[in-house]
Image (cartoon, helix red, strand yellow):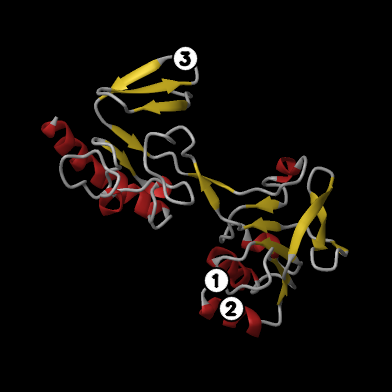
Amino acid sequence: MSIARSACTLQCEQHPYRIKLDDGSVIQTRTVVVATGSRYRRLDIPDAARFDGNGVYYGATQLEAPLCQDEPVVIVGGGNSAGQAAIFLSSFATKVYLLVRGPNLKTNMSKYLISRIEASPTIILKTRTTVVALEGGDRLEGIRCMDHLTGESEDHEVRRLFMMAGADPNTSWVSGCLSLDTKGFIKTGTSVLADSSLQRAPYPLEANVPGVFAVGDVRAESVKRVASAVGEGSMCIQFVHRALANQ
């Protein structure tokens, strides 16, 4: 086991495959399971990371909800996760400001969520709006947002901001080796038939390179849930054994 080491590149031109680590060492292997997940998109604001966990959150669960009791909150994002968070937190907060970069919610959010948001007196939708500044000392105390249509900025005294703007996959180290979809997630199974170097039908979790698998959030078309990722990881092991037996 290699503890606290990051994989820098995957070389799959020849077998066994080679994985270069950040300390310069190289691991040779006959099979690879990629389970590197994804990173939450963050605010493009200098020094924003200092508020992580101190007013800026990346999930709206039963742990964060009591913190929002009887005070306003801000949610950044226009997808289903942002919509679900807005509806959930509206039961606790006095106001829920939902900030989206686009002109509406129709592009990325389900209709049933849009209907519930429009019907809620607590949720205030602000389109074409982004957060441009965070204010506070040790903890978040306020934000400044800008309307990109009018150019006007607006300050809000809030202590809780939820970033629900999606995630980017940790696949930069396998680019050039594995087939990725348009968002950078690893394609597996039947989706790699056209660009596969396999001499057989790919296994369900197998990438375009034989014996290389992807599981969890890093895999294209995965459910993006913890339980699903654990299940895929367990299921993948039987395919690893099959791949080894065919080598």
- Residue 107 position by quadrant: bottom right
Contact (CB < 8 A) between labels 3 and 1? no
Mark seen at residue 114: 2
Say which amino acid is labelled 2: Ile
Q: Which mark is residue 24?
A: 3
Q: Residue extending furthest left?
A: 245
Q: Are marks 1 and 2 in contact (CB under 8 Å)?
A: yes
Q: Residue at label 1?
A: 109
Q: Give coordinates of residue 160: x percent, y percent.
A: 72, 58
Q: Name the element at disc 3.
A: loop
**Amino acid type assigned to the residue bearing label 1 in the image:** Met
N-terminal of the pair, mark 3 or mark 1, is 3
Instruction: Label 1: state its secondary structure.
Output: loop
Name the kind of residue labelled 3 in the image: Gly
Density class for disc 2 (Cα within 10 Å; few <14, some 14-19, many ≥20) is some
Task: Return the residue found at the far bottom.
Answer: 119
Task: Answer whether residue 27 is visible to the viewer in this image.
Answer: yes
Name which quarter of the figure residue 165 lies in.
Answer: bottom right
